[in-house]
């Protein structure tokens, strides 16, 4: 295997070799995947159908749910299929597509979380200018920029990674195609260009992280100045879910890519990968709906309308 072009497929890391545990892994991932599909699907439907939620905050939340849904669909179904059919193989083109899609959606989500922090900052610290700064055109441009940044990030890293000669076999020590694990298969010194790109991406991510932190320092400073307790509660209910999602996303992903090599072990890498790639898309809908009364009301309407419509269909079919 002298280079990447001679590889027909890769072998992903199996969670276990025991058949019963493979089926358990399939069941657990299926449950998480269905929860992510249901939660994000309900949020997308609620925001799209309820005109009360046609505001910048919920527009960005709609985009976040789409990214979460697509992100978890990139990695989890393949892992479930491998456990169900007791295989580890993924084709070379499938691996490249998985890397591209995951980086595209992952980068887009990080950019979008930064935009959402800016939206919360304007809403609380500069409320009189909110309608002017966050009009529909500005929101569409910012969302498009977030998606475009993820696309550019994915093109650069995927093209660079799969142009590197691979001479250390074809076993990827992860349950999906992850760049740090693919780089371990490269020939000596041939991976330094991609490492340089990763460093640049991490630096840009750190700049976004600093922007989010500074935004929330100013937000909480402004919130504590609000005289009414009700006003403070409303402001916190808007900001705390986003802050929780940002904290979960950043802490797990930064640890995955910045942890020292001495901490690298297959079991730890596997757990960290699950934490940053599988858990956030599944729990984000729950975090956003817990303290948000408007969203909970819209979700109740969607659920009641769904059951009412299905009941009418069943009644008509029975007649």
Image (spheres, helix red, strand yellow):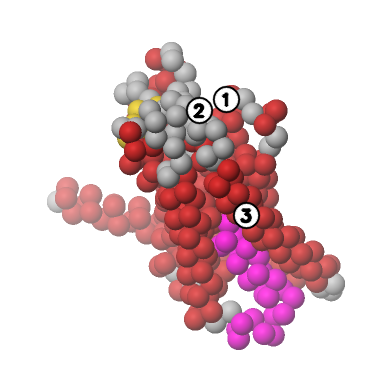
Q: Nearer the viewer, mark 3 or mark 1?
A: 3
How much space separates mark 3 and mark 1, taking CA atoms? 26 Å
The residue that appears at 66% across and 61% down in the rendered structure is 208
Specify start and end residues of the magenta stretch as a single range. 110-133
**Magenta stretch: includes residue 16:** no
User: Of residues 282 and 101, which is closer to you in this image?
Assistant: 101
Q: Return the x and y of residue 24 as percentages of the image width and height.
A: 44, 22
Q: Is residue 143 visible?
A: no
The residue that appears at 52% across and 39% down in the rendered structure is 190
Whether residue 280 is situated above or below residue 141 in the rendered picture: above
User: Of residues 230 and 124, which is closer to you in this image?
Assistant: 124
Q: Main secondary structure of the magenta part?
A: helix
Q: Return the x and y of residue 122 as percentages of the image width and height.
A: 68, 75
Mark 3 and mark 2 lie on one chain; the one further toward the N terminus is: 2
Q: Residues within 10 Å of mark 3 (few under 14, many from 20)?
A: few
In the picture provided, is 251 more to the left or to the right than 313?
Answer: right
Q: Is residue 256 visible?
A: yes
Q: Nearer the viewer, mark 3 or mark 2?
A: 3
Q: Which residue is mark 2?
A: 173
The residue that appears at 47% across and 18% down in the rendered structure is 16
Whether residue 291 is situated above or below residue 124 in the rendered picture: above
The residue that appears at 34% across and 32% down in the rendered structure is 7
Q: Which residue is mark 1?
A: 266
**Magenta stretch: includes residue 131:** yes
Q: Which mark is residue 200?
A: 3
User: Of residues 74 and 285, which is closer to you in this image?
Assistant: 74
User: Of residues 51 and 220, which is closer to you in this image?
Assistant: 220
Mark 1 and mark 2 lie on one chain; the one further toward the N terminus is: 2
Q: Return the x and y of residue 136 as percentages of the image width and height.
A: 50, 80
């Amino acid at each position: 295997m002298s280079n990447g072009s001679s590889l027909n497929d890769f072998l992903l890391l199996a969670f276990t070799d025991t058949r019963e545990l493979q089926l358990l892994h399939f069941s657990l991932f299926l449950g998480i995947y269905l929860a992510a599909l249901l939660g994000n699907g309900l949020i997308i439907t609620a925001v799209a159908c309820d005109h009360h939620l046609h505001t910048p905050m919920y527009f960005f939340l709609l985009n976040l749910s789409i990214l979460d849904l697509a992100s978890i669909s990139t990695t989890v179904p393949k892992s479930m299929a491998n456990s169900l059919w007791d295989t580890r193989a993924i084709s070379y083109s499938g691996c490249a597509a998985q890397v591209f899609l995951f980086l595209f959606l992952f980068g887009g989500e990080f950019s979008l979380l930064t935009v959402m922090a800016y939206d919360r900052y304007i809403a609380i610290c500069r409320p009189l200018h909110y309608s002017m700064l966050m009009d529909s055109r500005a929101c569409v441009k910012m969302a498009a920029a977030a998606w475009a940044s993820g696309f550019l990030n994915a093109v650069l890293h995927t093209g660079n990674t799969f142009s590197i000669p691979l001479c250390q076999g074809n076993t990827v020590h992860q349950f999906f195609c992850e760049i740090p694990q693919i780089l371990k298969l490269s020939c000596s010194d041939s991976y330094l260009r991609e490492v340089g790109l990763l460093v640049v991406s991490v630096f840009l991510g750190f700049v976004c992280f600093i922007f989010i932190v500074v935004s929330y320092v100013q937000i909480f400073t402004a919130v504590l100045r609000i005289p009414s307790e009700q006003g403070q509660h409303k402001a916190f209910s808007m900001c705390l879910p986003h802050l929780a999602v940002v904290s979960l996303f950043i802490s797990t992903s930064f640890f995955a890519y910045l942890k020292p090599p001495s901490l690298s072990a297959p079991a730890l890498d596997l757990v960290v990968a699950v934490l940053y790639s599988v858990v956030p898309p599944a729990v984000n809908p729950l975090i956003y709906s817990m303290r948000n009364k408007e969203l909970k009301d819209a979700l109740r309407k969607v659920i009641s309308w769904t059951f009412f419509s299905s009941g009418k269909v069943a009644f008509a079919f029975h007649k």
